[in-house]
Image: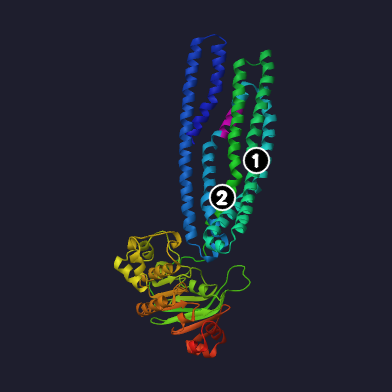
Amino acid sequence: MALQLAQTAAALLLPDLSADLIDDGVLEADTGAVWRIGGVMAAVALAQLACALGAVVLAARVSAELAGELRTALFARVQGFSARELGRFGTASLITRTTNDVQQIQTIVQVTLSFMVTAPLMCAGGVAFALAQDVPLSLLLVVVAPMLGGLVVGILRAMTPLSVRLQEALDAVNRIMREQITGQRVVRAFVREEHEQARFGAANAEYTETSLRLGRLMALLHPVVTAVAGVAGAAVVWFGAGRVESGAIGVGALAAFLGYVLQILGAAIMATYLLQQWPRADVCARRIREVLDTVSSVAEPAEPVRALARPGRVELRGVGFGYPGAEEAVLSGVDLVAERGRTVAVIGGTGSGKSTLLSLLPRLADVSEGAVLVGGVDVRELDRKLLSRTIGYVPQRAFLFSGTVASNLRFGAPDASDADLWRALEIAQARDFVEALPGGLEAPISQGGTNVSGGQRQRLAIARALVGRPEVYLFDDSFSALDTSTEARLRAALAEETADAAVIVVAQRVSTVRDADSITVLDAGRVAACGTHAELLASNPVYREIVLSQLTEEEAA
């Protein structure tokens, strides 16, 4: 701001010096005065240039650092979101807000910092200096200013709704593009390339058309202001010539007045450039603020409990869960207990709430009613790091991060040794294929683990949970990509490793759950029955239907 003040003062001084140069030097044929005043003008112009450059450099630095802090704040906020908040915003929109929207804010801040002092001071100073040169001629500004203001405001009002539509269209393009990349195999398997291209084309056309309409309005601003400036300059010369002829003002004063008018209109052009960016930046700021103001439904306890009352025990008491606005709850009145040294299986039809139930234990979401207790303590009161060390969770979708095999295995246990990693890989039946990879533990893993097979991803995800040796294991349909023999070896190794831990297994295969100490059958989000395989086969029609859909009567018995 100090640099801009100095720059503005220097700019306002130049027309006055120019008037002196004309009146005292040129018209009087005084070469000495020309050199003297010209030298002063050159020094002032250089000072103005130096201040302007310094202001722009500092503005660029401040705006870039602000953008970096905004991205960090958004990332940190999204990291704390539960499934509810992630579902509300959507992945594509969150990515757009963290990248494109922040970039728009960076641009508006840089432009604002560059012009926020210069433009208004130049206008105010220009009017004051113009009045000092000639008051009657300054009445032209009374005509020009409302005309310019009305045109600019009208264009900006038309730009605002288009800016909202543009960001929404960009969200749609990003969402479809992300779906195309993630679901490429499905698209190709069903030969739906043309359909997906048409779908993307429609979203892209909407984005392009909105961008063009907004661009046309933005492009209209500058020529409108320039045209008004040209008309004003011509009017100054036209009316000013008469006043010079009458002797009311001198030639130098007219030149200085014209310079101040052009400075005022130049400041208006700078302000117009700022206003061009404003509608879209305003929309982006609201979208960013919406994310930053969203508080996760999974909140950190004010005074977290840092010790477990009953290690190795998991209990669900009357648990209910539903998404905001949903007609029906996903889970309702669910009771379940898992003790150290016992395996509890959860089975049910598609959409019965099995995965949702398991996600409540590590607090990926919080219950709507009831309570989830781990180690005898409500998970909403537990220290999150303690909860993470206590639970080893293998999600339904085995996701790996870009890095190496070792970095993925140490994700939950950064201090684990190589021996710990190999032990976990051996139990997970993954040691053989990891040893065969170039680099072994340091073999590269691409984003999502796309450079290994589905079964290998599942085994690495299981090994990742085993590395930390937690007290509670959660397996969410974690054996679905394994062949029968590999699954049998893995379950046998797991039985020995998890002998002193509580294990909860969600599965679709009856072969995976039939040997569990207790089986809980879910039906439409409610517990239909609990018992052993033999008890449920004899007494529960839901479980019997699931079993007989996979096994014969003899195999089931």
Can the viewer see residue 310 in this picture? no
**What span is colored magenta in the figure?**
119-127
Q: Nearer the viewer, residue 490 or 519?
A: 490
Q: Per the image, is 100 magenta?
A: no
Residue 401 x, y percent position in the rendering: 42, 61
Q: Is residue 508 left or right of residue 446?
A: right
Pick the residue in front: 127 or 469. 469
Q: Which mark is residue 479?
A: none
Q: Position of residue 388 (x, y in %)?
A: 41, 69
Give the amino acid at mark 1.
Arg
- Residue 467 coordinates in the image, percent (x, y): 35, 69
Check disc 1 and report its element: helix, strand or loop.
Answer: helix
Identify which residue is drawn at 66% across, 30% down. Answer: 227
Q: Relative to residue 344, is residue 419 depicted above or below?
A: above
Q: Is residue 421 visible?
A: yes
Q: Secondary structure at mark 2?
A: helix
Tag 2: amino acid: Ala
Local crowd size for mark 1, using a 10 Å CA cut-off: few (<14), some (14–19), many (≥20): few
Q: Position of residue 33 (x, y in %)?
A: 50, 12
The residue labelled by disc 2 is 285
Question: Mark 2 or 1, which is nearer the eye?
Answer: 1
Badge 2, how many Cα within 10 Å: few under 14, some, many 20+?
Answer: some
Q: Main secondary structure of the magenta part?
A: helix
Residue on which disc 1 sits:
216
